[in-house]
Amino acid sequence: EDELWIAEDGDGPEGAEGEANQQQHDALKLPPPVKSDSVWLCSCRPTGCMHRFSAKGAMLFRPDTRLFCPKGARCKLRSRPEHEALYIHATRSQFAADLKLGDIDTVVVNQEQPPGARVPSTPSIPYQLPSKPSKPSKLKAIDFKMKIPFVDYAWRLDQPVSRPPPSNALSNAPSTGLIEPSPSLRLPRSTKVIVYVHGFRQRFFQVHANALYIKHQLDIKGLATDPYVMLPFIWPCHFTPGAYLRARAKTSKAGAYLRQLLNTLRHELNNEVYVIAHSLGSRVAAAALLVHDTTQVSTTQAEQPQTEQPLVEPLVKGLVLEGAALAAGAMHENGEFPASRLSTESILVLYSSHDSTLRDNFPLGEAWPTMKRGAPRPP
């Protein structure tokens, strides 16, 4: 279930090294990696792996905005002008060579101290991520570095992202011509952010391409009138079809990391946040937004009960669930994720009668543990 991060994150380097990098990409006949302030990415799984959580927790960074076609140079859709113009069609050898060019150290800008103990693997409800270590440790250069191909800077979400970078962090940054005096100024602030949460069996490239395609459709159809940021959230969803229950078991912990991201975007960076979740990602989004303290329940404006106690401001403006891998009654008042207890102003559920995967396979996957216990099958 290990994967190769094909379309990784990068900015066009400047100076002599940047020119050399450009020449290398020209030799590959591929455009060099390019970043955009309107596209970010958050991942809580390690590079090249689809079934584990990262020991460093959730990381926020700007990804490469190049769109590679998953079918590569043999794609049968290349005869369609829109497809050919939107995607880059590369061979496997080009992909591999391109990835080698991105082998640089990634600086963790807001690293306060070395990471503590790993996040426990047994989830609780509500799932709580561990706090940072109470005893500070001596910082070393390695503590500010990690490996994400083509990524110069990343931010840990278990630390304040607005913290100025420690001097010894940037002093050990890779010499790629990308060093900025205040890299945190690029973080999305006071704008609209659309967080895309993928479903089961999604490789990094697929998630990244899907998010960019959603952004492309919003832009060309004029559906987004105000500036906004597209931000895919990547979690360990496994890859083999038989790993559904293992992926499902990770949704609670992934939801805790997603909640960490949403809190950062909303409260620390003052953004207006929307969430689009697909398939099993709907369970991740619901876990992130579920309010467990019933005295602080956030509901939609149309459903707010008459009460003298003020409700907590919703964490997100809107939640969109596409082909949600949730039981029919999951969002009822007595369900697993009551709609009245999700911290969002609005909920939109989209489904298709032609979705055979959701119609045929989802009930079987959900029924397996209940069948073993003799409980009734979920609808």
Image: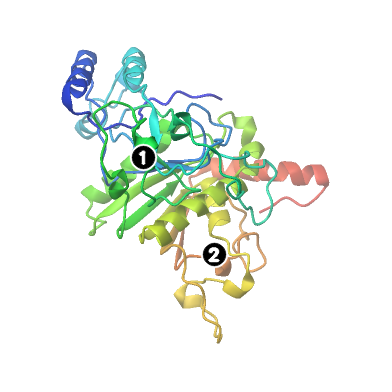
Q: Residue at x 55, y 81 (%)?
A: 305
Q: Which residue is mark 2?
A: 342
**Residue beneath the point at 71% across and 45% down:** 367
Query: The C terminus is located in which quarter?
Result: bottom right
The one of 171 and 320 positioned closer to us in this rendering: 171
What's the amino acid at mark 2? Leu
Measure the C-alpha gap from mark 2 to mark 1: 41 Å
Q: At numbered mark 2, what does the secondary structure look like: helix, strand or loop?
A: loop
Q: How is the image coloured?
A: rainbow
| Residue shown at the point (22%, 28%) measured from the top left | 13
Above or below, 70 relative to 339:
above
* Apparent side of residue 10 relative to residue 352 in the rendered image (left or right): left
174 displayed left or right of 350: left
SS class, disc 1: helix
Please say whether residue 129 is visible from this viewpoint.
yes
Q: Amino acid at mark 1?
A: Ser
User: What residue is shown with label 1?
Assistant: 167
